[in-house]
Amino acid sequence: MLYYISFLILISIWLLSIHPEFYRFFYSADALYLPVLFQDLFQNGISIREWNLQPSPGFFPDWLAFSPIYLFLFDYPYLLNPFFSVSLSGVLFYFTLKILGIPYSYQNKEENRKSWFLVIFSILMIFVVTGQGKELITYVFLGTHHIGAVISSLILAFILLKKDSKPKLSDLFFFIIFLYLLRLSNEIILIISFVPLSVAIILSNSLKNKKTYYLLGGMIIHFLSYPYIHKLYRSYLKVPHFQPEKLVWNQLKSKELNVDFWVTNFHKLLELLNSVYNRLDFLSNSFLILCLASIVGFFLQSLLKIDKSDFQHLKNPFIRNPRIFISTFIFAGTMFQIISILALSLFWQEETIFSFRYYTPLLIYGLISISFLLENINLNSLSLFIIAIILSFSFFSVYSIYDYSFYKYPPLECAKQLSDKENLNRKLNGISGYWDAKPMSYWSKGKFNTTAMYDTNIYNWVSPTYQHNKNTKYFFILEAENKHWDSARLRNQLPPASDIYECSGWTLYYYRNGFSF
């Protein structure tokens, strides 16, 4: 219980003292996917079928965690994503401690593992609070990117570790349903969970148990039937075809992702890795290397140093060697994810290697591995001391909670100027680039309903479809100074703007009579 209380205190202080640098992570267009979607579903009465969902919609556990937060905080939009991240971090922490707390040998090392995880997690929190490691470490604490898939992976691993020896047909049925839910939520689960867990079951000598065949059979049934389930699912909901994991799978099926591919691209691969090293700060590079080294070290230690007597007494006949099971699951999941990131960077888009949200599983698995490797070092009293230092340090930054309530999306100032001058009391439809469409709609509470564009075409990526049709009339164009989207070509096709408003790097062009296209 001490660990959970300590964690709740720490994560709450992190929420209070987060560095302003991280606002952009909470309030970016990608991060506002669930807030804007829920705003449409529950406040604007829009059907979910009128939305182009994310390729990874995140039904479980993201929607489940976000729903009660939205229910209580929908009037406080600046708090939705921070509290959502805290809730998912809490679930992640809970299942991580559950896995760390399983007896993997006759020695009682569970408390040491949990203490180390709490301390390392807390130290990372200090860096986030002070604005360090923002390119990489931040994603460990954000609920808006793939952390839900990591939680699902840990839940699956925990279920398998806790399974009893008496197989039931109902287990198979619910297991298959659960697999459908996880995969429809996020396809990344294939790489970081489904395949690694199958490998882990085999290497941990679990094939001697009848339950294994039920679960592996469920996995096979899932793979064979999933295309039909997915087709039915996509006939009801609008979900983009784009899936990085499917691109890798297609390359594997076509045998293009072979040894020759890696040999031919070896020099380019080294250049990509070097570019990552140059992009990240010292702290992020050090943490990433430490995580990867710990994952490999934990796997090798489990294979080489665990004696059969360590697990023969354990009352868990399903997983014959739980330590090899968990280390193999972590190692395989990490390797498959690294191969996926590198392959996509080589044959699709080089920028993929800088999508650090895909590194989240590696970082979480790394933290778990470090906790196992340090389990022989007693940390109970030291952990409390370190936590006390962190608490004392963090209280100096509590004042920044007020920054949440004072946070203003800069283009709102343009919107206010326009509303005051024109005495507007109605909603306006408008156009912007992708990175401003959701924020403008969200922070204006739908009063400035903004549709994303790319060049001179509507960009329907992760957005509501009801915003645009041939009869839709638009009254403003919002353009950012950083030119994520240059509206010049579109504006050249229109009459001159009635008014132009400038606000902190954004320009709002107002068309009093509106325009259509």
Image (tube, helix red, strand yellow):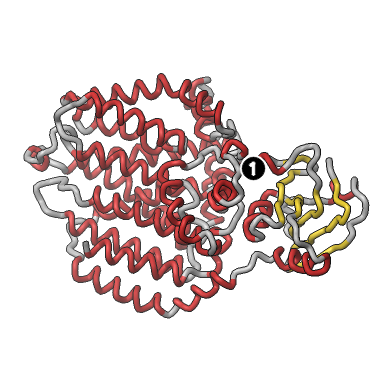
**Residue drawn 92% across the image and 55% down it:** 496
Residue type at numbered disc 1: Pro
Q: Position of residue 240 (x, y in %)?
A: 59, 34
Q: Is residue 369 visible?
A: no
**Residue drawn 64% across the image and 42% down it:** 464
Point out the residue furthest to the right here. 495
Residue placed most toward the observer, 74 or 396: 74
Relative height, residue 284 to residue 157 (above, below): below
Question: Which structural element holds mark 1?
Answer: loop
Q: To which residue does mark 1 refer?
A: 464
Q: Quadrant of residue 436?
A: bottom right
Relative height, residue 456 to residue 405 (above, below): above
Q: Quadrant of the C terminus?
A: top right
**Residue drawn 49% across the image and 24% down it:** 252
**Residue drawn 52% across the image and 59% down it:** 74
Q: Quadrant of the N terminus?
A: bottom left
Residue placed most toward the observer, 367 or 216: 216
